[in-house]
Image (cartoon, rainbow, N blue to C red):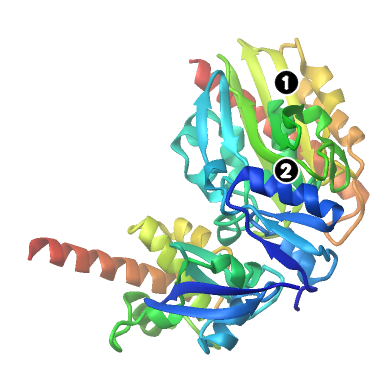
Amino acid sequence: MIPAQFDYHSPGSLEEALSLLEQLGDEAKILAGGHSLIPAMRFRLAMPENLVDINGLTDLDYIREADGWLAIGALTRESALEESQLVQDRYPLLADTAEVIADPLVRNLATVGGNLAHADPANDHPATMLAYGAEIAVQGPGGARTILIDEFFTGLFETSMAANEILTEIRIPEPGAGSGGAYLKVERKVGDYAISAAAVQLTMDGDTCTGIRIGLTNVSPSPIRATEAEKVLTGQVLNEELIEVAGQAASDQSDPSPDLRGSVEYKRDLTRVVTKRAIAKAVERAKGAAS
Amino acid sequence: MSKHTITLTVNGEEVSREVEARMLLVHFIREHLDLTGTHIGCDTTSCGACTVSMNGAAVKSCTVFAVQANGATLETIESVATNGDLHPLQEGFWEKHGLQCGYCTPGMIMSARHLLEKNNNPTEEEIRWGISGNLCRCTGYNKIVEAIQYAAEKLQQETAEEATQ
């Protein structure tokens, strides 16, 4: 399968990339890891007239903590997240996520920025970044701006970024005392999208949950938070019954489509289960970290 | 439609060719360079038969445009044996019957080589994880895992022997 014809551009700087986007308008797509875009182009689901390849912008490839944030450059490969000791030690939700994205070969090229900018509710980072309450830094012709993750996803494959803007950095708040997280994904096989998955980031004070955010993968037309489940748990002393109620609330809020991965009923029930289990694991980690 | 002249190092040799922007790296390797050891299995980024090493990382060459490999260092299955001597991985696949039809083997070996470069003493679970982007429809994977274990042991022995010399 051969993609349709296009013109290829390989800017050497962010400024050059932005000016290309400005000049080419809607006819251009950004090529980062390419592991969503190139398959779509081979099927001719996407036929952009121009590709702006940002792989040369190597200064967008970093993982570092600064000023209360974990900053991840948009061009950071998934494999770099997976191998980062910092991520493994301090960001268990992110570490869980990185190792279940697609397969190891794909992770060697696929980027964190691309996973988010593609805004596919089946992708794993959207739920995780919703759970973290991340911020997305973008650069446009008018300068830089920051978009809260809750305002980033506007629909299926749609974000609040303009066509002439480039996602440059993802910022995750540094974990406070008593915080923990987990990502739990059920997939038919390695490399497939989730049937359902839940991302949980929470803070515990003893047995009381003082704050929690939950993101869900592939059970809605655009990436969503399980806000009703969050409400069930916030400020409460957690126990098994309450976590069950939260799982059910996430299930009720999910809006999956039936496909070869399962029926609506099955996906809803699986959402209940993965949410419950991810909460339990996050609690365990939060308590482990606090002790 | 744009055409581009790309220059890259493939199996230690510099090559330069003009390619259409839309040409996939796997087609470039097979059709322009006649290196047909790299296979096309699924065309959907699923199977890993097209795995090559690009700048030291194992990647699916069906999901990279050739033009993106401009300036890159590429290694294909043809580079794995040296002077006709099988690499320990190739020897392992031979000794442990790690292949039946052989179609997935080049990709398996390129992925396994990347795995062993990062982790010279992987557990069985780590091996299975490392090749989880490569599909095999014949073996059921057990013999492939044994082949990679064989190679890991042999490579460790070689390293130990070099150290004592």
Separation of residues labelled 2 and 1 (CA atoms): 21 Å
Image height of A203 relative to B7, above or below: above
Position of residue A284 relative to residue B107, above or below, is: above
- Let me know if residue B96 appears in the view: no
Q: Give whichever of B24, A196 is nearer the camera.
A: B24
Three-letter code for the amino acid on which mark 2 is drawn: Leu
User: Which quadrant holds the N terminus of chain A?
Assistant: bottom right
Taking the image as shown, residue A167 lies to the left or right of residue B98, namely: right
Query: Is B165 positioned to the left or the right of B94 in the image?
Result: left
Q: Is residue A61 visible?
A: yes
- Taking the spot 78% from the left edge, 20% from the top edge, the residue there is A242
Q: First in sequence, mark 2 or 1: give its number.
A: 2
Q: Chain of mark 2?
A: A
Query: Which disc is residue A212 wearing?
Result: 1
Residue wearing tag 2: A116
Query: What is the three-letter code of the residue carrying label 1?
Result: Ile
Residue A5, label in figure: none
Secondary structure of the residue carrying tag 1 is strand
In front: A132, or A70? A70
| B70 or A24: nearer the viewer | A24
Mark 1, Cα crowd under 10 Å, few <14 / some 14-19 / many 20+, is many
Residue at (65% x, 48% y) in the render = A16
Q: Does residue A68 lie above or below A33 as drawn?
A: above
Residue A81 in percent (x, y) is at: 54, 43
**Mark 1 belongs to which subunit?**
A
From the top left corner, tell me how far across and down residue A179 is, in percent: 60, 19
